[in-house]
């Protein structure tokens, strides 16, 4: 994932970016790039340590129908091998997976943010509403 996209996803986790902004960019990607992007989001989710108790809130916040395939799959748990199945769905399901995974990220990220927000070595938990900090991250690249 490009650093600028990673920053945007983390901004979504902090409530600074709307899902529509991310979704518009996602929808322009090719099928293979969409799958790659979902795998990258999955990596960010695993860093944020999702919990089984998050599942119902994720489905509710996503506003997706509980009968959609990604919602049915996520009910099986938040283990990496289970969530990976959401990245392997056909193209017509990937947008739903994207929305669901972003909401899982946001819920688990917020929990980690409260614990890690003062860690100077983890830019993804910095206050990303500060443009100076974002410019610093972009200037230094992924060296953190």
Image (tube, rainbow, N blue to C red):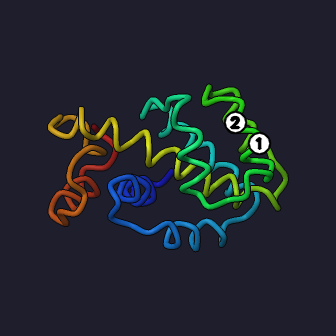
Picture quadrant where residue 55 is located: top right
What x and y, as percent, mark residue 137?
Answer: 25, 53
Picture quadrant where residue 61 is located: bottom right
What x and y, as percent, mark residue 15?
Answer: 35, 60
Q: Name which residue lies at 56% across and 47% down.
A: 58
Q: Name which residue lies at 44% across and 55% down.
A: 9
Q: Name which residue lies at 14% across and 38% down.
A: 118
58 to the left or right of 74: left
Check disc 2 and report the residue beneath it: 75
Are dots 2 and 1 in contact, CB under 8 Å? yes
Q: CA distance from mark 2 to mark 1?
A: 5 Å
99 to the left or right of 144: right
Q: Secondary structure at mark 2?
A: loop
Check disc 1 and report the residue beneath it: 72
Image quadrant in which the C terminus is located = top left
56 to the left or right of 48: right
What numbered label is drawn on residue 22?
none
Report the number of discs: 2
Q: Secondary structure at mark 1?
A: helix
What x and y, as percent, mark residue 66?
Answer: 73, 51
- 131 above or below 6? below
Q: Are there few (<14), some (14-19), or many (20+) residues within 10 Å of tag 1?
A: few
What x and y, as percent, mark residue 124?
Answer: 31, 45
Q: Are there few (<14), some (14-19), or many (20+) residues within 10 Å of tag 2?
A: some
2 to the left or right of 140: right
């Amino acid at each position: 994932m490009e650093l600028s996209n990673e920053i945007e996803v983390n901004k979504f986790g902090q409530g600074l970016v709307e899902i529509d902004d991310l979704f518009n960019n996602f929808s322009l990607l090719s099928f293979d790039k969409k799958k790659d992007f979902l795998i990258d989001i999955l990596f960010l989710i695993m860093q944020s340590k999702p919990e089984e108790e998050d599942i119902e809130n994720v489905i509710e916040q996503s506003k997706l129908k509980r009968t959609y395939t990604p919602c049915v799959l996520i009910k099986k748990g938040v283990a990496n091998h289970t969530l990976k199945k959401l990245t392997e769905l056909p193209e017509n399901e990937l947008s739903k997976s994207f929305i669901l995974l972003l909401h899982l990220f946001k819920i688990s990220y917020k929990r980690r943010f409260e614990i890690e927000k003062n860690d100077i070595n983890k830019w993804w938990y910095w206050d990303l509403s500060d443009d100076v900090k974002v410019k610093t991250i972009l200037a230094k690249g992924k060296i953190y």
